Each structure stands twice: as C-alpha cells, then as structure tokens.
Image (cartoon, grey):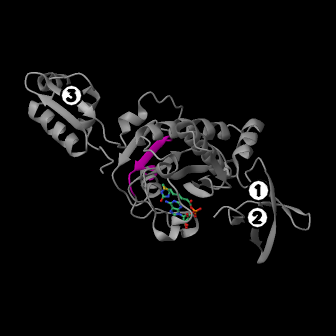
Amino acid sequence: MSLYIGDIMKEKVLLLLKEGEYISGERLSEILGVSRTAVWKAINSLRDDGYEIDSVTNKGYKLVKKPNVLNAGAISEGLNTKVIGTEIVTLKTVDSTNEEIKRRANENAESGLVVISCEQTAGKGRLGRKWTSNEGGVYFSILLRPELPPSDISGITLAAGMGVCLAIRKFTGLDAMIKWPNDVIIGSKKICGILTEMTAQTDMVDFVVIGIGINVLQDSFPEDIAYKATSLKIEKKSEPDLSKLMHEVIAMLDKTILSYLFGISQDDLKLYKSMCATIGREVSLTRNGEKLSGEAIDITPDGELVVCLDDGKKINVNSGEVTVQGIY
Ligand code: BT5
C-alpha cells in the first residue's frame, strides 16, 4: 500500500483527471504546458501509486478509483484555516516529523507549516520513549511562532488534544476522549499521542513544534503496545480516507489552538473537561519520591490536573506521570 504522492506533475494531472469523464492526453499536455510523454509518465506513475486510470483511444484518460493516500492537494482543498496548514508537505518517510519541522524552522520556515509522513523511522514519544510509526498511521508536526512568553503556552498540548479528539468525533462518530494531558483514547486504548517541543529565548518563544501521531489504518500493533493501542480502522471497522481525515484534523486544530493562544475561555475549558476521561477517576502518582493516590477532580486554566488526595488535600499536577485506574 503506497500512501504518498510527492511529484508535482502527478498532483497537477490528478487535479485535472475526473471520475466519470475522459480528458485527452493532448488536452492535458496543453493545459499543463508539458509534452504528451510527460503526461503519459505521470499517468503511469499514478497507476503505480494505486490509482485506477482507464485509457481509451481517441477519448483519453478517466479516473476510475483513488487509493487511500495522503495527498497535500486533497488535504488542503477547501481548507479555510487562519494559520495551521498555510503550507502542507507530505512525505513518504522521515526520521521524525518533529525533527523535520525543527530543521525547516531553523531555515526560516513560516508559522503554520504542517509536515505529514506516512511512516517514521525514529518516531519519538515523551521522555525519550518511542512512538511506533509504521505505515497505516498519520504522523505530523505543526510549526508555530507565537509571539508569547513560554509560560503562556503551557497548555498548548491540551488544546491540540482537544482538536484531535473533536475531529475524530466529527469524522468518525466514535466516542473519542482525552487522557490528560496528551493522549486521545477510544474506550481504554490509545489512538493518538502528542509531543510538544519548544525553542525559546529568555522570555519569548522562538518556535513551538506540536507533533501528533494518529493510528488510522493499522490492523494490529507490535506486542509491546498491543494491549494499549488501537486504530480508527479497528474501532470503526472501516477504512477512513487519510486525506479527508487530515483535512478535518487540521481544520479543528486551527480552531482549538488559535483560540487557546488568544487566551483560554471558560467555554473551552468546560469542553475540555467534558471530554477528559481522567476526571472522576482514581489516579496514582509519585511526587518527591512519595507515592500518592486520590481522585482527579479538575483541570486548571493552565492545564494542570487537580487531584484530591486520599487524605483530602488538593494538589495541582503539571506533568503527565499519572497512572489512571481503568485506562492502560
Ligand atoms: C506520546 O508520548 O504519546 C507522544 C507521541 C507523539 C508522536 C508524534 S508522531 C509525529 C511527531 N513526530 C515524532 O517523532 N513524535 C510526534 P508518550 O506519552 O510518552 O507515550 C509513548 C508511549 O505510547 C510508548 O512508550 C508506548 O507505550 C505507547 N505507544 C507507542 N507507539 C504507539 C502507538 N502507535 N499507538 C499507541 N501507543 C503507542
């Protein structure tokens, strides 16, 4: 299964090919200002990518069936975002989309760039953990350059989680929830993880990279994560269209993240809490070497989890090392 179209000529030919209507090779070469051989090569290359294209003498080419691929053109079609997705790059493979975004950020890439890959050879989780990034998932990172002090973006991962959760709900109808702070889950299994990294001067953010991995088409997972990982295909029992899903996810992230950057509203916080599976559950955590347990009762506007300990004392927890009863 190939999930990638990189070649610009192929993208252009694809935009002109219609399902149900033939277009001649001559007309394609006229519109695109290239030779008929170039058109023919692009058509063959699209066929290699899994597109079914019919060709009939004197009539030309007709698109019969599209494969389920990540396609920058299809993702951005009709996308009316303010910042996120102003540029979208799709890659077949990369070490880590977070690393790729950092390389591009250091070469002055603009705020809003999204880099999506069909697989990662060195996908990262938090605290040096590994993110399993086989073909079938979508792995992407967003570059943002908010003119804010680092303390003002401490909850940005929560806003991203909310965006992914809402997009999955809207696109699939599945009952996605958030496991504070950075996982999206379905039932008690993880469908998405988020890794936010930041480069800052003393009191101003230089850039933020929000890296998101969503399990989409996987049928199974490696043994070490099989008990805790699931995919949209497994849950939905059908194959979501990768490009349409990414379109929806980017559109939703643009809303939730920009809204957060303008200052978190009571409504957003309320919505986050309503989707947070951690609230109301028994949790355990380690603080200064001491093992503590209690009930997660609230989220603060800064994105901290409020835990009511067994002795009745309330504490705010700001990092994710919390074990939630009943969820992996
Ligand atoms: C995360 O870390 O959940 C953050 C994952 C971020 C991945 C994205 S993909 C695009 C961008 N580029 C990158 O290199 N990273 C970002 P954490 O909370 O530490 O969870 C990691 C743990 O999740 C692992 O130790 C496994 O137990 C589990 N895990 C690994 N791969 C998984 C997968 N595909 N699905 C579900 N769980 C997984």
Residue 141: percent from left, percent from top = 48, 50
Tell me the quarter of the picture where residue 319 sits: bottom right
Quarter of the image that includes the C terminus: bottom right
Residue 96: percent from left, percent from top = 43, 59
| 107 in magenta | yes
Question: Label 1 sits on what residue type?
Answer: Leu
Instruction: Measure the C-alpha gap from mark 3 to mark 2.
Output: 57 Å
Q: Mark 3 — residue?
A: 62
Instruction: State yes or no: discs 3 and 2 in contact (Cβ < 8 Å).
Output: no
Stretch in magenta: 105-119
Question: Label 3 sits on what residue type?
Answer: Lys
Q: Mark 2 — residue?
A: 283
Whether disc 2's CB lies below 8 Å from ligand 1 is answered no
Q: Residue at x 66, y 61 (%)?
A: 327
Instruction: Measure the C-alpha gap from mark 2 to mark 1.
Output: 11 Å
Closest to the observer: 57 or 304?
57
| 259 in magenta | no
Q: Residue at x 25, y 32 (%)?
A: 64
Instruction: State yes or no: discs 1 and 3 in contact (Cβ < 8 Å).
Output: no
Tell me the quarter of the picture where residue 266 sits: top right
Closest to the observer: 311 or 259?
311
Residue 118 appears left or right of 309: left
Q: Residues within 10 Å of mark 3 (few under 14, many from 20)?
A: many
Q: Mark 1 — residue?
A: 305
Determine if residue 291 is in view: yes
Whether disc 3's CB lies below 8 Å from ligand 1 is answered no
